[in-house]
Image (spheres, rainbow, N blue to C red):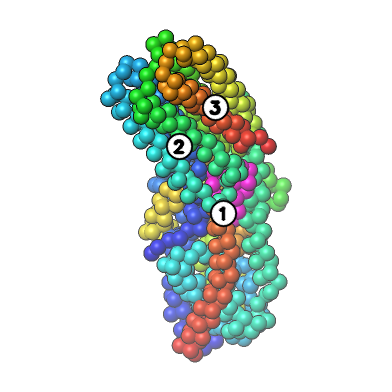
Amino acid sequence: MAISNPFSNLFGRSPIKPMQEHMAVAVKAAAELESFFDRVIADDWDQAEAVQKRITDLEHEADALKKQLRLHLPKSLFLPVPRTDLLELLSQQDKIANCAKDIAGIMLGRKMTIPPSMQEKTVAYVNAAVKASDQALVAINELDELLETGFSGHELSIVEKMIQELDALERKTDQLEVDMRATLFHLEADLPPVDVMFLYRVIDWIGDLANRAQDVGSRLQLLLAR
Amino acid sequence: MTVIAEYGHILLILACVFGLFMAWGVGANDVANAMGTSVGSRALTIKQAILVAMVFEFLGAYLAGGSVTATVRSGIIDPALLSDTPELLVFGMLSALLAAGTWLLIASILGWPVSTTHSIIGAIIGFAAVGVSVDAVDWDKVTTIVASWVVSPLLAGTVSFWLFRSVQKLILNTEDPFGNAKRYIPLYMFAVGFLIAMVTLLKGLKHVLKESTFSPNFFESGLISAVIGIVVALIGMRMMRSIKQDEAADAINRFTSVERVFGILMIFTACAMAFAHGSNDVANAVGPLAAVVSVISTESVNSTAAVPAWVLLLGAAGIVIGLATYGWKVIATIGKKITELTPSRGFAAELGAAGTVVLASGTGLPVSTTQTLVGAVLGVGLARGIGALNLRVVGTIFMSWVITLPAGAGLAILFFFFFKGVFS
């Protein structure tokens, strides 16, 4: 006897856990950048390629999760937060993985080397950007607690604090970016111009990574604002 | 008269078989909705849920099921019109049981969400209006019943909404949710015990203890219920004492320990839910049976005679058998599907629904437990408590109303003329 139960059909699949899973994968892709840059600086291109492959795989995984999530968010679903805000947050999360993939892709493709005098700063810069995306993940991981409290009350202030922390990390990345550009500016005359152009671009994109993380925080904030 | 004298025993046995079949259906399918919530939120294991369901469905049916049984038995049809032809009432109630049972079976196979309550009411209206006469139906009463089908989900939703809001305010949205959970949850436990005891004392017991002189007035009932509520709260506090804050689990989700405390509360609301369900839905099977029994034993239409206790027992037994043979599977299936409902939300939904259903049982209104629970869950959802709710289900439920009433009625009419042809 088949049973269609009105009661169990009432419950759709909650998007909260999948949102967090998606963010975890996206941030994992970004975190791989640290070891990618280590390999690049060590001039170990075989290993670098392996890491780049991992980043691409993670980006694909994030894409697949994103598609699944979208498919399971039909308009007839009643959610505790606006559906459009949730979808917007999702696409912001996804951009973190895309950004990581782009950085690794272009560096591997052009076998870009980083001038020795810049290497230490670059590592610090990448770490700062990755740290910002980690912080964004921490904030997103509060989504289930937020759902628990009906997106209100004491929990809101906790998340607000996390988002402030994220903003601070992004500002720190910004300062490092300015420093990176200045350093490269002094070196650029001695380097092949095309390489310099692409170095500037990579610096830009690493900054973007932190910006994307901050965007996730802002979207989360919009989700909470009432 | 001759028909009943001649075939009385066969008719009685048929009524018992059909009534048992109907009760089995309620136990096999319906109870799962009431218990699935607790299993889904992992407040109870399936075995515990079945145990709770067996005990409290039985208690609910026996202690508080009398009023609704009386309504189904003799509230919808005007007995005066049938006093010359009591056999028609017997045929009618038999066909209503058979029709509702058959319709539920068909609907379950086809996968439509139908309500046992709606099937049986539709069937009774059907045979009375067509088989006897349109005037035989107490349309005022029918209007009240149908109105209660609209009101009960709304009321349950409103209660659950405010219950969950109060939980947010008092416990979840505070600096120390765990401490506040232990502080305030006994209040909810008190409410569960008080509510159930109050309705049972005021409305239910008179059907069981009709010989006894024990009939508490409103004030006495309130006092006794308060004592029972306090006892329930004390038992709950004792059970909560073993729950300690689990730092490791809280690191992943800050509310893990808090939810464990709510899990204890949910054991109580699960009992209340089973009690409420038993008090209301057993009547679907037992009401028509009681009517048949009363006609055959007195050979006249007598609406004032109380429902014999053994009839309620038979219905309760049927539910337990249904639960043991098939219902547990359904509970397991539903439990797996609704894991989204954490104890803090599940209890709000269950308490809202159980309160509404028990109230309806006390007033003698047959309502659909499932739909009341759906209303309650929507109420919690409106308080922004549930990850995702499928609103299309609400439409499906509405459709099943529109189909179930005429379908139950049509089948009942068919069986009615069949029985009439066979026995007279």
Question: What chain does mark 3 sit on?
Answer: A
Provide the secondary structure element on which disc 2 rests. helix
Numbered mark located on residue A22 in the image: 2
Residue A56 on image: x %, y %: 37, 34
Foreground of the two, B341 or B223: B341
Q: Is residue A104 magenta?
A: no
Q: At label 2, which amino acid type do we have?
A: His
For the residue carrying disc 2, how many other residues have a C-alpha within 10 Å: few (<14), some (14-19), or many (20+)?
many
For disc 1, the marked residue is A76
Q: Is residue B379 magenta-colored?
A: yes
Near-viewer residue (A154 or A73): A73
Residue B18 position in % (x across, y down): 45, 72
Does residue A216 appear anywhere in the picture?
yes
Q: Which residues are magenta?
A: B372-389
Q: Do marks 3 and 2 share a subunit?
A: yes
Amino acid at circle 3: Asn
Front of the two marks 3 and 2? 3
Between discs 3 and 1, the one toward the N terminus: 1
Front residue of this view, candidates B76 and A193: A193
The residue that disc 3 covers is A211
